[in-house]
Image (spheres, helix red, strand yellow):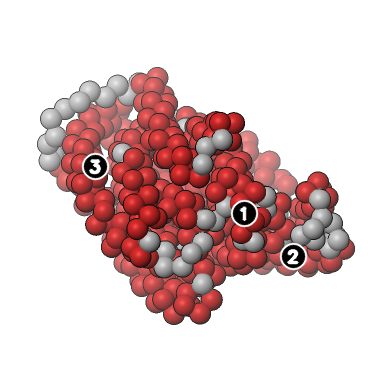
Amino acid sequence: MSLAKKFATVASGTLMSRVLGFTREMLMAAALGTGPVADAFYAAFQFPNTFRRLFAEGAFNAAFVPLFAKEIEQNGLDGARRFSEEVFGVLFTVLLVVTIAMELAMPVLIATIVAPGFADDPAKFALTKSLAIIMFPYLACMSLAAMMAGMLNSLRRYFAAAVAPVFLNIILIVVLAAGWQQGWDASAIGYGLSWGVLAAGVVQLAIVWVAARMAGIRLGFTRPKMTPNVKRLLVLALPAAITGGITQINQLIGTAIASTQNSAVSSLALADRVYQLPLGVVGIAVAIVLLPELARALKSGNDAEATSLQNRSVEFSLFLTLPAAAGLFVLAEPVVRVLYERGQFAANGSTPLVAAVLAIFALGLPAFVLIKAFTPGYFAREDTRTPMIFAAISVALNITIALILFPRIGAPGIATASAAAGWLNVVMLLTVLVRRGHWHSDRGLVKRLPRLLVATLLMGAGLWYGLDWFGAQLAPDSAFIDQAWALGLLVIGGGVIYILAAFGLGGADLGIIRRSIRRKA
């Protein structure tokens, strides 16, 4: 399967999840708005979700996949299975202990780390604690699922792991529909969503477990042992968890700071859902596919293939991400209005705040995607320490800017801090890759990147004038159908401008795309 087809396979599953995620968020915004129950749910869910991305997806995609790929290259599928059983025994035991400890310590964790600002509101604090206790075992399910997904990705079976997250959104949409039909109050909806998150974790684990067995990996539980392979994994995993989850670390910090202001937590979460669509479809697809492919190329000594993989991944990422960032920046307010402005969200008058946060997140979107494209260059070489140092520096910058700006401008200040930290991380990652000789930009990337930037600016200008043209249809008092078709025309028109400009200026080449689709990696 070609590199482009692998990206498309992962991206298609992620796209389904993100589209359903939009549907879920639209229903949640209508049911809860940006009120206290919404703040409590988003803060409680942020906790296990952040740990999942740090220690499950981040650590395993960074540390487990290269070691698993090495076992396949050196000892075949049997050796990889033995290695997986060693890891599974340790992982399951650690997760059991961590889950019990976190459940017992949840009141302290909520008060000190997750949402310290809620301590002044006993009802909101109690609700957040209860919801977090229900949802935290989701972390254990998703950590085990991440291990299964890492094995599947290394075996070049991408679809099951990509499509499994869809079921989280399906289950939560069913919960919201049931709540609407039966007339649940806001608190009941919050509890229903929390139990839905836990159920979704079990379902996702079952999907990848079955897929791994079908791929020939049948894991048996073994007594946890600190074998050399497990020790090597742990050495790589801790810094990898911090590095791979830098965006989530910054979000967790932002949530903690934002908890001191009403509606700030839910506003950040709703804006995050919108920009997560291009980040998930492009950035996560690139990271998932690039790491095992790059690891295999390096293990087999194919440096030319490794260089090509890195350059094409960055080119693919920016080709799709730059116009998405420009579009979200220019169209932030109409996008938020069409997606969310109904029910309790409209009653709270939340559109301007969420739109401002989204526009700033859009400026950081290319950075968040490039982080996903650059870090495999370290992880595939089993270097997780260097990007961890860069992550720590960017987190320090994020905290500093957030603490300075949040008291002055509120939630947009946290978004600004996150975007600035992302760009700093990109600069550091690329600089050291170049200095070490691990990054060699080819003529194609150097030639096409500036032209993609010009095409993006042309598209942004077209959208800016289009906002004036459709001003009446996009006004707050216009009918929803008028707002929707006007926004749809702007999105389509912007896409046409970008495609024509990108191909016309030479920022993209149809022949290269065709060869990339046909070429076997």
Query: Could you tell which of marks 3 and 1 lies nearer the N-terminus?
Result: 3
Q: Between marks 3 and 2, how big is the CA–CA gap?
A: 47 Å
Going by the image, does 374 lie left or right of 132? right
Alpha carbon of mark 3 to alpha carbon of mark 1: how far? 34 Å
Name the residue tied to disc 1: 345
Q: Rounded to the nearest whole Å, what is the CA distance between mark 2 and mark 1?
A: 28 Å
* Most foreground residue, 326 or 4: 326
Residue 460: give its label: 2
Could you tell which of marks 3 and 2 lies nearer the N-terminus? 3
Is residue 120 or residue 142 the one in the foreground? Answer: 120
Q: Of 400 and 507, which appears nearest the observer? A: 400
Q: Amino acid at mark 3?
A: Thr
Q: Residue 206 at x, y = what percent?
A: 38, 26
Q: Secondary structure at mark 2?
A: helix
Q: Residue at x 13, y 39 (%)?
A: 227
Residue at horizontal 18 percent and vertical 37 percent from the top: 93
How dense is the environment of label 1, judged by Cα within 10 Å: few (below 14), some, or many (20 and up)? many
